[in-house]
Structure formats: structure tokens, C-alpha cells
Image (tube, rainbow, N blue to C red):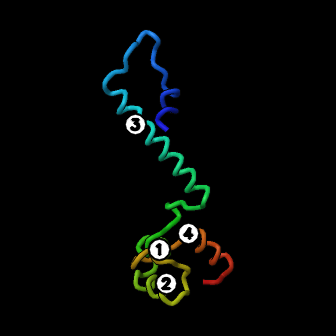
Amino acid sequence: MGSSVKHLIPLPKDIKAEPAWAGELKDLLSRLVDLAASLVSSHKRGLVLEKILTPEELSERLKLPLSSIYEAARSGRLPAFRVGKHWRFDLDVLKKALDKEEI
């Protein structure tokens, strides 16, 4: 990926040697391009972390006690998934369930 960065930032013709920091800049730009590609790829797969809520965030949005959120997740009344021991809620799935009145 580093070679493509070289073409993105051409050096002026009157400079014969790159400054000492040029290598670090190229490395940083390369990592930035990789990160952007990764974010685009994640978005295409539908993984957008802003749409994943913690129990605390869902409790605030629904104006319900946190204990009710955990109880509904454990019983299956709220669509939820676990990451290790932590509950998470997909906002899109919750909206669809609410629209269908499944909750």
C-alpha cells in the first residue's frame, strides 16, 4: 500500500531527496488509507457500531429501568445478543420488532 501513497503525494521536481519525516508521513497516510478501506468494508457488511446499543443506552432511550432491560433480554422479549458476558442491542432489529409489534 505504501507505493500507492507515493503517487498520491508527488514531491516537487526541485527536491532531490525526501526529508527525514517523509517516511513517517507515508506510513501514516498508508495506515489512514487502510483504516478508511476497513470502515467502508464494515459499513458494506452492515456493521455500523452507532446502531449497537448497550443496556444503559437502551434504558435511557426507552425510559425503562435497567433491570427491566436485562430481564427482557434474558427472557427473549427484547431482541438482543451477547458479546462475552455483555448484552448488546441492534437498533435496526429493535425498530423492526417494534414496527411489527413483536415486543
Q: Position of residue 101 (x, y in %)?
A: 66, 82
Nearer-the-camera pick, 45 or 4: 4
Instruction: Give the Cα separation between the discs numbered 2 and 3.
Output: 44 Å
**Upstream in the sequence, badge 3 or badge 4?**
3
Q: Amino acid at mark 4?
A: Leu
Instruction: Give the Cα separation between the discs numbered 4 and 2.
Output: 14 Å
Instruction: Kindly state the secondary structure of the residue where label 4 is placed.
Output: helix
Residue corresponding to mark 4: 91
- Taking 11 as reference, is 47 above or below it? below
**Upstream in the sequence, badge 4 or badge 2?**
2
Q: Position of residue 12 (x, y in %)?
A: 46, 14
Q: Residue furthest top?
A: 14
Nearer-the-camera pick, 52 or 67: 52
Q: Which residue is painted at 48% across and 25% down in the image? A: 9
Residue corresponding to mark 2: 73
**Upstream in the sequence, badge 2 or badge 3?**
3
Q: Residue furthest bottom?
A: 75
